[in-house]
Amino acid sequence: MTTTPPTPPLDAANLARIDRLAEALAGADAVLVGAGAGLSVADGDAHAGPAFEARFADFHAARGITDAYSGGFYPFPTPEEKWAFWARNILLQRYESGPGAVYRDLYALLDGRDFFVLTTNVDHRFQNSGFPKDRLFYTQGDYGLFQCSVPCSQDTHDNHDAVVAMDAAERAGAAAGTPMRVPTRLLPTCPRCGEPLTTNLRSDDTFVQDAGWYAAAERYVAWADTHQAGRVLHLELGVGMNTPGIIKYPFWRRVHENPEATYAALSLEPGTPREIADRSILIDADLGAALAALRERLIV
């Protein structure tokens, strides 16, 4: 279970902005949510911090790895060590952690409304919180899927059983004196061409967009096309400037083109173009505390 850390109190300025956001959400015809890594961080994810440090103390001592993101790009000397790290990481991030109160608050705020979620997160917390799959488009992949590393096809493969087996074998090996490696026989290979499998996470031009990805993309485009006019709230949560072309810039453009639309951003450094500043609500506070306060205002 995820434990969300204590949050600082909201100041008067942000409380006033949350009041504005409550009015905008209550009066919205539809809500388009754009969710970035900051949403899961606020929910207490384990990409860094005490949970990651405890689980990966051996990799920290041997390789200096301090967080899941940097560990994902580490040049491990062997595939056996690479998959010892990745199997453990996938289990922690995808199958064992979350969701917490932040995602539950967001679902409570959106349940019963006409909404769609566009997210760069890959941790499955939306699905695990009860969000309907047909209202989600997770553009950057899924910790729960493997793909061919070549790739020889646009197929993906559920990885639960494989990562459980690799992790169990690695722990058994560590107990026997050979830590941080999985048996070579368990290294995942493509069932079609025999090349190594890899994670279905967008990092270069080998990323596989499978049939499910395209179906979700089509649902998102269809929803957005249907809601080009009217009181549409574009609610951006925990989105930074790492990949602004996916969420942030399209949201700004849609709000600019629709005079009835509103843009709201909850993050530590929100911003907005001057062209839509009068229809923007920027809340620079702890995201979890802000959503909890918003829920208090709208849900009895």
Image (spheres, rainbow, N blue to C red):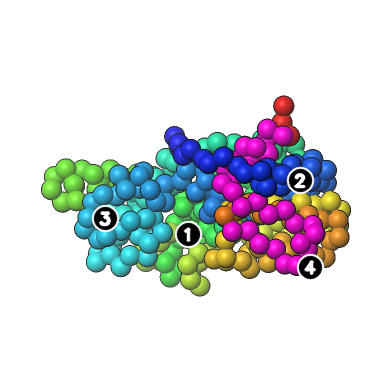
Earlier-in-chain disc, 3 versus 4: 3
Which callout, 3 or 4, points to the residue nearer the camera?
4
Residue 270 at what x, y percent from top left? 63, 58
Q: Amino acid at mark 2?
A: Arg
The kind of residue on which mark 1 rests is: Asn
- Do tag 2 and tag 1 residues touch (Cβ < 8 Å)? no
Callout 1–callout 3 Cβ contact below 8 Å: no
> Which callout, 1 or 4, points at the residue further toward the start of the chain?
1
Q: Secondary structure at mark 3?
A: helix
Residue at the disc numbered 1:
200
In the rendered structure, which segment of residues is drawn in magenta?
A: 269-297
Number of residues whose C-alpha sits closer than 10 Å to that of mark 1, classed few (under 14), some (14–19) or many (20 or more):
many
Type of amino acid at the residue the image marks with label 4 = Glu
Q: Which residue is mark 4?
A: 275
Q: Which mark is residue 60?
A: 3
Horizontal arrangement in the rendering, residue 123 relative to residue 114 (left or right): left
Name the quarter where the C terminus is drawn: top right
Q: Which residue is mark 2?
A: 20
Please state if 238 lies on the left or on the right of 253 as rendered. left
- Crowding around mark 2 (Cα neighbors within 10 Å: few <14, some 14 to 19, many 20+) is some
The label on residue 253 is none
Mark 2 or 3, nearer chain start: 2
